[in-house]
Image: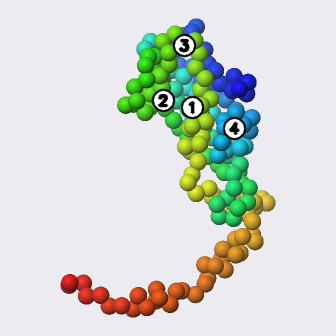
Amino acid sequence: MQALRQFSLPLKGLKTGVHEFTFEIDQDFFKSFENSPVKSGLLNCLLSFDKKDDHILLNFVTSGSVVTTCDRCTAQINLPISSDYEIIVKYGEANNEMEEVFYLEPDAHEINVASLIYEQIVLALPMIKVYDCEVDEPRPCNFDILSILSEESEVASNPLGDALKNLKIDKND
């Protein structure tokens, strides 16, 4: 957990007002999380830390890329991601009714934002991991897989489906 120590921010002694912190996220960060869907990447996270008397407002702006497998051609790609996430931190007992609120013990001296940043990155991953790699040189695409997919899409249509298309349905029934 030493890799996540840099994500601990002091609460005591930090004056009321807006403070900004910048974090660089790399593969050491992702190794700290068990069963992470992301193993490697390079991202920057800008944290705006607005400390008030009774709560803290955290705004995370993260951008960069993660290394993943393309769902179209199975090649390793640097998938660009970005996200903007805001969360409120309050002191006291957790109230499960509010999802955007993170609770701390009243006597907490610091907050470690690593898990909040990690969740933000994972939630920013698209369901289908593809992107337009036409501008990349060299293109990371696996052209063997792409040609197989192209051949399969050209297969003749299903004769049963064609027969159903020819049915005339009376729409007045």
Which amino acid does the dot numbered 2 rest on?
Ile
Most extreme residue toward the front, as rendered?
Answer: 34
Query: Residue 12 location, x and y as percent?
Result: 57, 9
Distance between mark 3 and mark 1 Cα atoms: 17 Å
Residue that mark 3 sits on: 108
Residue 6 lies in what quarter of the image? top right
Residue that mark 1 sits on: 116
Q: Nearer the viewer, mark 1 or mark 2?
A: 1
Distance between mark 1 and mark 2 Cα atoms: 9 Å
Q: Contact, CB < 8 Å: mark 1 with mark 2?
A: yes
Q: Nearer the viewer, mark 2 or mark 3?
A: 3
Which amino acid does the dot numbered 1 rest on?
Leu
Q: Earlier in the sequence, mark 3 or mark 1?
A: 3
Residue that mark 2 sits on: 87
Relative placement, left or right, of 58 versus 147 is left
Which quadrant of the rendered structure holds the C terminus?
Answer: bottom left
Which secondary structure lies at badge 3?
loop
